[in-house]
Image (cartoon, rainbow, N blue to C red):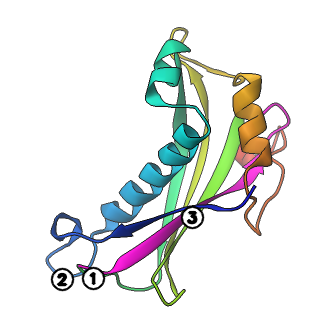
Amino acid sequence: MPTYEKTYTAIWADMDPNGHMRHSAYTDYAAHTRVDFLAKQGFTMQYFAEHALGPILFREDTRFLREVKMGDEITVTSEVAGLNADGSRWRIVHTIKKPDGIVAATVTVDGAWLDLRRRKLTVPPPEIAEAMATAARHESYQDIVKGDKEEK
């Protein structure tokens, strides 16, 4: 599957007092791209509500590399950087690029699937595990193995 990407224009509400995009806007764009990727695979908010399932994050790491200013166009990609054997844990890297291809930031998230009825981690339905397994992989991809620091 090709790398999933969305293009946005940085708006006034995204700016900080220094005139560049505020730190939390980067993670907002990454999250929207991640959720949109799932929706395009058929896993909409309605799907998650009907299945009492939701993605949760354990870690979010943003690296700021270049300024984004109001009106700048950015492209945000979502690539899987890690999965465990049953698809219940995952890592996604979002790369935020300016139109010239320069990387403005990366947002890396580690997450899992939560059974919303039991409030416990769970294995996703096979169709979600398949979508994640066939999604574009980031160059840093590594299997998530039980016992790894991130798996505890």
- Camera-nearest residue between 19 and 146: 19
The answer to whether residue 113 is visible is yes
SS class of the residue under badge 1? loop
Three-letter residue code for mark 2: Asn
Count of numbered marks: 3
Q: Quadrant of the C terminus?
A: top right
Count neighbours of disc 1 (C-alpha within 10 A) and say few if under 14, some if 14 to 19, many if 20 or more.
some
Residue drawn at point x = 32 percent, y = 62 percent: 25
Task: Assign the magenta stretch its main secondary structure.
Answer: strand
Q: Position of residue 89 (x, y in %)?
A: 70, 37
Instruction: Assess whether mark 3 and mark 1 are in contact (beta carbons under 8 angstroms).
Output: no
Count neighbours of disc 2 (C-alpha within 10 A) and say few if under 14, some if 14 to 19, many if 20 or more.
few
**Residue linked to disc 2:** 18
**Residue 69 bears which disc, if any?**
1
Left or right of 85 on screen, residue 61 = left
**Residue linked to disc 3:** 77
Which residues fall within the magenta stretch? 71-88
Please say if 74 is above or below 37: below
SS class of the residue under badge 2? loop
